[in-house]
Image (cartoon, rainbow, N blue to C red):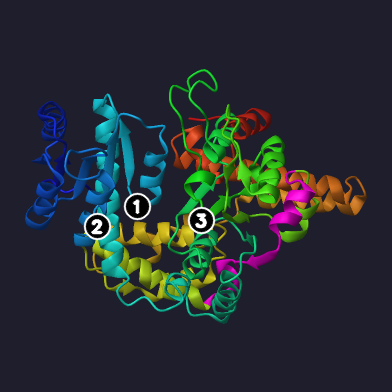
Amino acid sequence: MTPVASKILIVDNKEEICGVLSEYIEREGLIPVVAHTGEAALERVRSEHPDVLIVDLKPPDMDGMQIMKGAKALDEDLPVILVTGYPEIRGAVAAMRAGAHDYLAKPLKHHEVLRVVFRALNERALKRKLRHLSSQIPDEFSLRETMGPSDAVSRLISDVTRVAKTNFSVLILGETGSGKELVAHAIHHFSPRCEAPFMAVDCGAIPETLLESELFGHEKGAYTGADKQKIGKFEMACGGTLFLDEISNMPLGSQAKLLRVLQEKTIYRIGGTLPISADVRVLAASNHNLQRLGESDALRRDVYFRLNEFTIWVPPLRERQEDTLYLAKRFLDLTNLELQKNVKGFTQSAVDALLAHDWPGNVRQLRSMIRRGVLLADELITEQHLGIDSVSPKPAVACAEDDKQTQEALRGDLTFKEIKHRKIVAIEMEILAQVLRETGGNKAKAARLLHIDYKTIHSKIRQYGILQD
C-alpha cells in the first residue's frame, strides 16, 4: 500500500510544469517537492529523502542523466521518472537502460503521470520490504531460502550455478507454480550479464496482436493506434536477459520471428527498416514436459532445439515433501509481517494435512493457502483455516464416473484412447468450474490464473456447457 505522506521530487526549470505536476500529486494526498536546477535537486534528495524523483531530461545546469546518477548515488532505490518532449529519441532508451524507472512524454497527461508515480511508489515499497526480509539471504540468490532445503533444490542450485556463467539459452521446465521464474532470476543474477536488465514476458498473457509489439517494439504510425514509438523488451534487455514464460503459448508466426532474432542477434521494430542489435540471453519456460514440448505442435521444433541448449527441470512440490513445512513456515512469517499479526504456527492436524496434500498448484498454491490461514487464525492455523478439504477432495460424481468407465473398458465398450479423452475432459471441466467460481465468473481473470488465453477459455466454456451463477 502506498504511504500516505510519500514525497515526490519534481525537477524542471519551468514553473508551469512544476505547478501542473504538483497539482496532480497533491490531489492524491502526496507531497510535491520542487527544484528548478540539478544542484538544487540533489540537495533536496539529501535533505528531503523523496520517495520518487521526476526529472526533465534537459534542465538548464545539469543533464537529466547526471541528476539521476547523482540521486541514485545518494539513494540507490530511488525510482527516477524522466520527462522528455522527444520520447522516440535514443536518449530515452539509454536512460531506461541506465536505471530509470520509466519516462513520461510531453504533453503530460494526468492519468499517465499518476499511473507511473504510483507504480514507482509500490516498487520502492516492495524493494524496501524485500531488502528487510532478505538481509540474511545466502549466496544461492535465495533459491535455497525461497524453495527449501531439500536435496532436489540442492541439485537445482547446482544446475543453475553451472549454466549461469555461460551464454547458453536455457529451457526451464516445471509445473505451474513450481518456481520457474525464480530459477530464471537466479541464472541472470549469477551470469556475467547481471548488471544489465532482466526482462520477463508472459507469452500466454498477452494477446497475439500485441505480443510482437511487446517483444520487438514498433515505430510511430506502424499501425492504427501506434501514436508513438514503443521500445520492445528485446531492445530494453540489450546486454541482459529476456525471460519468455510459457513459450509454447507463443503463436507460430511469432515463433518464426523469434528464431530469426536468436540466430541473427538483430531485431526490427514493427514498421521499422533499421536493424537493432539484440545482444540478449534468452531463457524460456514451459509447464509441458520435455518430450511433449519437443514433439508438440505448439512449439516449432527448430525453436525448441535453439532454446534447448541446456534444460533445467524444476521439481513439483509433491516430489520434495521436506520443503513443504519449511515453505509453510516461511510464508507464515511473511504474511504475519504483511498483516501485522502474530500467528505462531500450525496445529498437528494442519501439519498432517499439509504433508498429505499433493499440491497440484505447487508452491503458488501453498503460499495462497498459508496466507488464507494467517488471515483467519488468531494463534494457530488449523486444518479448517487452510481449507484443504475444499480444495482437493475428489467429487463423488467423478468417482462414480470412474467406476462406470472402468466397467465399460472391461466389457470392451471403450478403448483406452476414449477413456483417456473422457478423463481429460472431466478434469478440464472441474478445473474450469472451480477457477470460475473463485474469480466470480471473471473469464479474463480465470484465463490469467490458468495461463491460457481468453479465446481458449471462452471456447472451452462453450464446448463443455459450463454454466456460471
Q: Is residue 215 above or below residue 362?
A: above
Q: Is residue 436 above or below residue 279?
A: above
Q: Position of residue 249 (x, y in %)?
A: 64, 43
Q: Nearer the viewer, residue 12 or 413?
A: 12
| Quarter of the rendering containing residue 342 | bottom left
At label 2, the amino acid type is: Lys
Asked if disc 2 and disc 1 are in contact, CB closer than 8 Å, the reply is yes
At label 1, the amino acid type is: Gly
Crowding around mark 3 (Cα neighbors within 10 Å: few <14, some 14 to 19, many 20+) is: many
Q: Residue at left 42%, top 72%?
A: 142
At label 3, the amino acid type is: Gly
Crowding around mark 2 (Cα neighbors within 10 Å: few <14, some 14 to 19, many 20+) is: some
Q: Position of residue 124 (x, y in %)?
A: 26, 53
How far apart marks 2 and 1 lie (CA) works out to 9 Å
Secondary structure found at label 3: loop
Q: Which residue is mark 3?
A: 239
How far apart marks 3 and 2 lie (CA) works out to 21 Å
Q: Which residue is mark 2?
A: 72
Residue 317: in magenta span: yes
First reached walking from the N terminus: tag 2 or tag 1: 2
With 21 as the anchor, is 159 left or right in this view?
right
Q: Which residue is mark 1?
A: 99
